[in-house]
Image (cartoon, grey):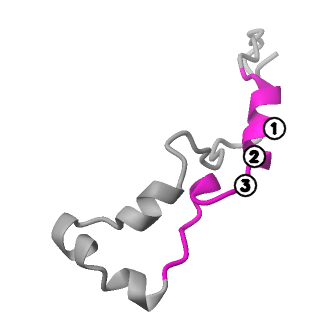
């Protein structure tokens, strides 16, 4: 029950939240991909505004940290 006496349902899928928090890899959990100085001056980066090398190495389906307040 909530503080106002209304019963609340927990709609969170705690198993999925746990699995997402355990994922690791390039770009997972919103962590930056480490770049070398050579990567930063890459011609493709200057032309396109993003690093193709890094973009090709991070998953499109990656997890982000859960920023919700704990109960």
Task: Name the residue tied to disc 1.
Answer: 18
Quick one: 30 or 46, which is closer to the camera?
46
Query: Considering depth in this image, is 2 or 58 the residue closer to the camera?
Result: 58
In magenta, the rendered stretch is 12-35
Circles 2 and 1: CB distance less than 8 Å? yes
Q: Is residue 54 magenta?
A: no
Q: Secondary structure at mark 2?
A: helix
Which residue is label 3 attached to? 24
User: From mark 2 to mark 3, how far is it between C-alphas?
Assistant: 8 Å
Residue marked by disc 2: 21
State the mark number for residue 68: none
Q: Residue at x 76, y 20 (%)?
A: 2
Left of 23 or right of it: where is 40? left
Q: Secondary structure at mark 3?
A: loop
- In the rendered structure, which disc, 3 or 1, sits on the residue that comes first in sequence? 1
Instruction: Confirm or deny contact between disc 2 and disc 3 (CB under 8 A).
Output: no
Residue 54 location (% of width, % of height): 45, 65
Tell me which residue sits at (42%, 90%) in the image.
37
| Tag 3 and tag 1, C-beta contact below 8 Å | no
| Residue 9 percent location from the top left of the image | 75, 11
**Height in image: 19 above or below 55?**
above
- Kindly indicate the quadrant of the structure image that contains residue 62: top right
Q: SS of the residue at dot 1?
A: helix
* Disc 3 crowd, CA 10 A, few/some/many (<14, 14-19, 20+): few
- Residue drawn at 76 percent across, 41 percent down: 70
Q: Nearer the viewer, mark 3 or mark 1?
A: 3
Q: Quadrant of residue 26?
A: bottom right
């Amino acid at each position: 029950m909530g503080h106002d006496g209304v019963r609340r349902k927990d709609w969170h899928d705690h198993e999925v939240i746990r699995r997402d928090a355990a994922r690791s890899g390039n770009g997972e959990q919103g962590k930056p991909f480490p770049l070398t100085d050579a990567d930063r001056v890459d011609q493709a980066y200057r032309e396109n505004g993003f690093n193709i090398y890094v973009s090709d190495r991070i998953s499109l389906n990656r997890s982000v940290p859960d920023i919700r307040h704990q109960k």
